[in-house]
Each structure stands twice: as C-alpha cells, then as structure tokens.
Image (cartoon, rainbow, N blue to C red):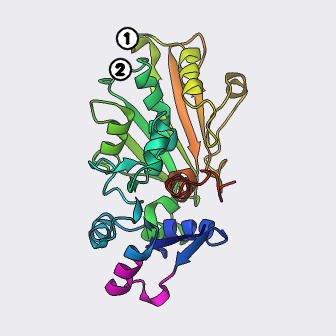
C-alpha cells in the first residue's frame, strides 16, 4: 500500500532533510507543489488530499495550516513549537514513556519534539519518574548545537566565514521557547534554567544536565542514575546508554558524533565515589532532533516499522 505525504515547508532546513529521507521510498508518494508552494489554494488542496502532512513552518504558519485541514482522515505531524504542550496533540517522542509509541500510532495530531528538549527529556524524565530527581528540583541544562538549528539567517551568518563567531551563547533572557516543553515532558514542576549556545559547525549537539548528587534527597550514585536510564531505554532502537566502563575511558565528546543518524546516546559522567554528575545527550539536531524524529513518527502513524528509511 502506498501512502501520500505532503511536506508543507519543504524548502526549509528541516523540510529538505525530511524530503531527502522520504523521496527514495517506494511505499510513499510525495505531493510536491514546486513553484505553487506559496499558493494558498494549492496548499489547501494538498493539505486535505494527503494521508499524512508534515508541517515544517514557523509557529503562526503552522497554526494557519492546521486550520486549513478539513479532511478528518488526514494525519498531521507539526515540527514547530506551536503544539508541543497543547491539549489534543500527542508528543512525538516514542521512547519517552512505555505508552508513548502506542499513543503516537493512534494519533491524528502529533507534535514533533524540539532538538534540545529531546536530549533533555531523554536524560531527565526517567530520573524524575524513578524518584532520583524530585519533580520540584531546580534543574539546569546547558547545550550547544550546530548552526543549522538556527534556521536560514543563522546558517547564512555562520557560513559567511568573515563574520561568524566560533561560539555564541544565546537565550540570555532565560525565556527560550523550548522551556515549557522541556519542563512539562520531563515531569518537572518548575521551569528549567536553560543555557543554549551555537557553535561554528553545521549540525550535531550536546545537551548536558549537571547534578550535585549529595544535595539530592536520595543522594543517588552514578550507578543508580545510569541504571535508571538503561532500564528506561532497554530495547529501544534509536536511544542508547553508553556503558560506565566506556564512559570512564572517554576524554572528550564530539557533538558531531551521531550526525546523519536518528540515534541519541546518553552518558552519565562522574566519579563513582564522588558527589557530582554530568548527564550528557549526544544527537544530530537535524536527525533525532528534527527530520529523523518526524520520519519515525510518520512510520508509526502509518502502521509501518518505525525504522523504515532511517537505518
């Protein structure tokens, strides 16, 4: 059976990545508008004719696109931040919870997770659920992404080598749009303190949560933190936890290490007899952090193997 797919916003960074992953598949037919992609009538027809729609648009444009869909059978994946905490939308992180994959399979509306939140939630949600980090704990997350995560203007800035910085911290007002998503889906009661940065490389990211273990009520050990993550992601194809022996032998972590994949790797750094830990997620911000996640969600919504076209 062939499914028809429409990518609204196929010319953007995420849209292009998704199209590249889908157009070679024999089980899918892409609706391509070409020069008519900004024609409201053509878009409305495509939005209502497809079996599934993937929205790669700014928030307001995504809301407008959803309002244009009148066909109740159309399934929607939205890659913007518009619906990531909205009632009636399923959060598209299949590995987040044992029931999440099933909810995505049955959903008509799925919100694709953000790249930073995928790393943060992947690290923190299992620890909150296990009671190792209290839900009301003040949590800090530091992260660095390749410049492709910033969209067209940031890409142009960093690819103009004469004016590009080597590294830039941003989100300095502490009101980054990912904070509500990160807080809600990690199971926390207080907004996380999010410190993002962009580096002078195209794609790949590290998301880090530092913890003072002795300050936590349970004073969890490195082994307990690691064990909780291993248990949470046992059997998952795309989320893995590095072994402690391997971690202890590492002298660095390359943010580009999983580029071109839909994988995420979680690490628990720290002295096993000490009182501090550094939890670090490694992923491709355009893979598991965007287009790869969208394709995985699409596969689940269409009743296909979730790894189709991803390995």
Q: Residue 20, which numbered label?
A: none
In the image: residue 45, left or right of residue 11: left
Q: Where on the picture, by quarter, is residue 244? A: top right
Q: Residue 134, which numbered label?
A: 2
| Residue 286 lies within the magenta run | no
Identify the residue at horizontal 50%, vertical 70% (top origin): 5
- Mark 1 is surrounded, within 10 Å at the Cα level, by few (under 14), some (14 to 19) or many (20 or more) other residues, namely few
In the image: residue 47, left or right of residue 311: left
- Mark 2 is surrounded, within 10 Å at the Cα level, by few (under 14), some (14 to 19) or many (20 or more) other residues, namely some
Q: CA distance from mark 1 to mark 2?
A: 8 Å
Identify the residue at horizontal 32%, vertical 30% (top origin): 188
Depicted 149 relative to depicted 57: above or below: above
Query: Where's residue 46, x and y in %?
Result: 41, 78
Farthest residue, direction front: 1
In the image: residue 174, left or right of residue 196: left
Query: Where's residue 50, x and y in %?
Result: 45, 72
Foreground residue, 236 or 45? 45
Foreground residue, 3 or 271? 3
Depicted 83 relative to depicted 264: above or below: below
Identify the residue at horizontal 52%, vertical 58% (top origin): 302
Label located before the other in sequence (1 or 2): 2
Magenta segment, which residues?
32-46
Q: Which residue is mark 1?
A: 217
Q: Decide: marks 1, 2 in contact (CB < 8 A)?
A: yes
Would you say residue 217 is visible in this rendering?
A: yes
Would you say residue 163 is visible in this rendering?
A: no
Depicted 141 relative to depicted 268: above or below: below
Identify the residue at horizontal 61%, vertical 37% (top origin): 236
Query: Where's residue 52, x and y in %?
Result: 46, 66
Q: Where on the picture, by quarter, is residue 79? A: bottom left
Locate the N terminus and report the quarter of the image it occupies: bottom right
Q: Secondary structure at mark 1?
A: loop
């Amino acid at each position: 059976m062939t499914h028809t797919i429409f990518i609204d916003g196929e010319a953007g960074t995420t849209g292009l990545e998704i199209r590249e992953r889908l157009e070679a598949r024999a089980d899918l037919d892409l609706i391509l508008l070409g020069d008519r992609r900004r024609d409201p009538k053509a878009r409305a027809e495509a939005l209502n004719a497809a079996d599934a729609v993937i929205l790669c648009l700014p928030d307001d444009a995504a809301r407008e696109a959803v309002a244009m869909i009148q066909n109740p059978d159309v399934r929607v994946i939205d890659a913007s931040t518009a619906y990531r905490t909205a009632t009636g939308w399923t959060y598209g992180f299949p590995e987040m919870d044992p029931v999440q994959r099933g909810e995505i399979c049955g959903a008509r509306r799925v919100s694709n997770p953000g790249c930073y939140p995928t790393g943060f939630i992947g690290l923190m949600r299992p620890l909150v659920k296990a009671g190792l980090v209290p839900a009301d704990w003040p949590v800090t997350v530091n992260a660095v992404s390749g410049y492709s995560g910033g969209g067209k203007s940031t890409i142009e800035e960093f690819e103009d080598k004469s004016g590009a910085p080597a590294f830039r911290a941003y989100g300095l007002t502490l009101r980054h749009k990912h904070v509500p998503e990160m807080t809600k889906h990690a199971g926390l009661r207080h907004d996380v303190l999010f410190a993002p940065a962009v580096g002078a490389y195209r794609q790949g990211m590290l998301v880090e949560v530092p913890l003072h273990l002795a300050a936590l009520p349970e004073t969890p050990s490195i082994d307990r933190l690691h064990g909780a993550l291993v248990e949470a992601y046992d059997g998952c194809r795309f989320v893995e936890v590095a072994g402690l022996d391997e971690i202890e032998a590492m002298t660095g972590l390359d943010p580009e290490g999983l580029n071109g994949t839909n994988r995420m790797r979680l690490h628990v750094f720290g002295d096993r007899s000490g009182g501090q830990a550094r939890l670090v997620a490694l992923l491709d911000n355009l893979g598991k952090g965007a287009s790869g996640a969208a394709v995985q969600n699409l596969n689940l919504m269409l009743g296909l193997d979730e790894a189709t076209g991803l390995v």
